[in-house]
Image: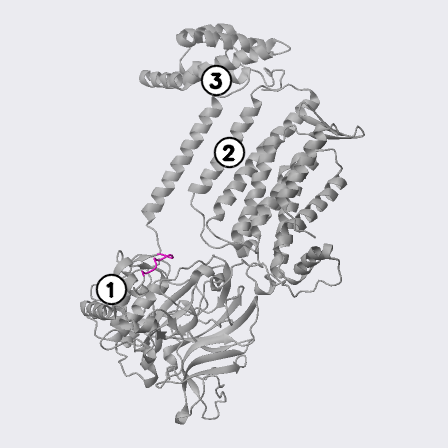
Amino acid sequence: MPPVNQTTLLAALAGLVVAAWLSGLVRVRSDDGVARIGLLRKWSLELDFRDTWLLLGLVVILGWSVATALQQSNWAPGSDRLPTAVLVAVLGGWLAAVSRLSRRGFVLIGLLVVLAYTVWSTLGAVHLGSSFDAGPVPDSLRPLALWASATWFQSRFAMLIGLIVLVMLTGWWTSWWVFRRRSGLVALMPSGTILAVEVLNDTSPGLIFFSFAWLAAAVLLLVRLHYVRLKERWHARRIPRAQDTTWTFGEIGFEATALLLLAAFLLPPLTSDDMSSQLVPSTLNASGFHPFNFGGVFHSGPQDVGYSETVRPGAQLHARPVVVMSVSGEFAGLYPYWRGVALGGWNGEAWYLLNRGPEVVIGRQGALAPKSEIPRADLPADTQRLKYVHNTFHILAASQGPPTAFSAGELIWVSKHPVSVQGIVNIPGGIDVQPTEPLPVNSGNPGASFDTVDQVHLADNPHPPYDYTTYSATSVVDEQSLRQAGTDYPAWVEPYRGLYYQNRIMNGGFTGQDAEIAALALRIVQTAHATNPYDEARAIEAWLRQPGRFTYTLAPKAAPIGVRQLDFFLFTTRAGFCQDFATAMAVLLRSLPDPVPVRLVSGYAEGTYEAKSQRFVVRATDAHTWVEVLFPGYGWEPFEPTPDSQNFPITRPATPADLNSSGVTASNPGTIGVPVGGGPSGTIGGLGGNASGSFVDVGTRVGVGLIVLLLLALLLAVMGVRWYLRPEDAPRIWRRLRFLGRELQVPVQPGDTPNEYGVKLARAVPPLAPEISTLARLFTRARYRRAGLDHRESTELHMAWDRVRRQYPRLLLRGIGRRLRNGDVKAAGRGSGSRGPGRLRRGAGRSRDGSG
């Protein structure tokens, strides 16, 4: 079967249609919006295009908004086919709906169109490899056999097929209910549901535009459909309508849409909490999330989830805000992160896991059974210095490589899955253990244990969604204790103090501006008067977070050739994100005359806290890198050098007494709770920290709220005045004139006829005397003549009123001002209640065209 060229096929089809029309085989006639197509003088097709063109444009916008939003999220490779698919469905459904097809015929043709276009548009996306055997099928059918096989065996391809079918059925459904049944709410249900689910699962800022486009088109569609149905009802009952009724409906619809969008843009949200779990309870439920193991946002590589076990300064983060996991359980207190991997090696360009060397032995425990404690010797012997917490992780998205066991601190055990553990090993008697050899676990024997744990993976390699529970420990310590911890480090700490482990340097040993970095580190700690590792770490942390010194950006500039990215960040651009700031702090600490043991940790920030479900929702954009410093007797303590306004320095109690009074103790782990955010981080030696908290000034919020309310009030006032000045029938126009006369204090007698009152009002407003006389005369005819006003008189009425209403606001203000100056407000108020001419009884004054 030769390859299918879609453009050639469409051109050939169009040529056949033109040739049939020129040869007389197809005849087309049009009469008052109804097209009649004759074929071979035997068959005919009637298409009723009346009142469908504007609706067609709105339906196209609805379908385009949904399809393009799905395309932007890139749920499956080939999603760029979705906008074209929905356009085909909408146009095809429109033509089928305006014809005389029955409901069954419409459904049957729709299914055929959806199936044909889906197969036709995706044949070129089949990739099963040259070795795939489609079975004993003819060569002409081999592409279809490959297509069916790919749909069955490839989940991503099946996802693409499902999305195309979904948007096409939605377009076909919308066309039927708009063009045939005239039911807007039913027509909007599928596309609105798809867009709502899309917004809940992909919170990218760009989707806001498609949401507003859909809302605007939906409001205008409802207004237009209401008007079309009224027209059809008037036509069936032979009721004439005013000439400018169409413009009135259009103006109302446009103003309502503008008001809705303006309110959505300007009004602040009632809450910033994520309410998706309340609307769709299974959204973050691992047991019910995508049971067929596909449907996540598709991107290749580690940027699917943001998290990576390699940290390289200068890299750019392109993660989407898709939900990676949710965490419930107990709150870690002084450790506001979900730890993934600890990296201790620095080669000048990137951070890596430490490998075996002469100073240390790196070992891996191959498969530790679920809930088996990791043998480790690095935790403080005093249990009062530790806080133990349980956390349940619901993993919804996979990372590249083996799945990481995240934890809220130093991991003790993991449930439901065996784990593999890697780190520095403490070997009794100096037994030489190869890195790949499993370590003994039986604590009854003098086995090996870990001096520090760098990496924990789930050994059974589960696929999302899955969950596990961790038991982990975090230190409970105050600033005074850390300052007094000293520098009596064990021997295995040396790789974390030296700048280059085993002299492993990238780029042929190029060390860049290490000398300048060492001088900078010394200058920072001396300026802060820091004399111990804790104060030195706080000084460098505060220096990096100093407002105005560095800029946080997810797209840092790449360093020129011959310049290290770290040097470029510290001395030139001073712009980057967590990887750059954490690298700078770690290298500065290791560059001090008495190096401080430090490592980088890659994982996630806590994420968004849901108070109702008491869990943290973690997205790919919450991926984070921070610094940990080792303090003898207390273990690794986290520090936060990144000034991103979302992660803040750890606020530790100042003294042991403050620690005891804070409630964060080993015996009081507490349930998971909202993290203590923002606030001043404290200063060291006058260097200062990031004092910008997460709270917005109350006065600013009140001012913004007042401005928004003022704008909305002004908009409503303008719309109200325009509505008041745009009556379309004689009775309403006359009531406006009566109101103007009361404000201008025109004398009125109970027996005055409309013409007599019009003469008095014309004398009060000489420039508009002809127009007011015309309005009085036409109002009298509209009220007392059985047939009402004819078309010529209605046009004359509107032209006269149009000239009057241009001066109406000025005249009204003049009358109000005159009354205020004369102090005649009360008298005017009493006089306004007089019953003069034209005072209509209930139901009176309705013209024949049904207006009133």
Residue 38 placement, left or right of 254: right
Q: Is residue 457 above or below residue 737?
A: below
Label 2 amino acid? Ala
Which circle marks residue 256 in the picture? 2
| Residue at x 34%, y 51% (from the top left corner) | 696
Label 1 amino acid? Thr
Q: Is residue 254 visible?
A: yes
Q: Is residue 247 above or below residue 622?
A: above
Q: Assign the C terminus to one quadrant of the image.
A: top right
Circle nearer the viewer, 3 or 2: 2
- Residue named by callout 1: 683
The range drawn in magenta is 553-560
Cα distance, mark 1 to mark 2?
53 Å
- Residue named by callout 3: 736
Mark 3 and mark 1 lie on one chain; the one further toward the N terminus is 1
Q: Is residue 752 visible?
A: no
Which one is in front, 95 or 117? 117
Q: Is residue 440 magenta?
A: no
Q: Are marks 3 and 2 in contact (CB under 8 Å)?
A: no
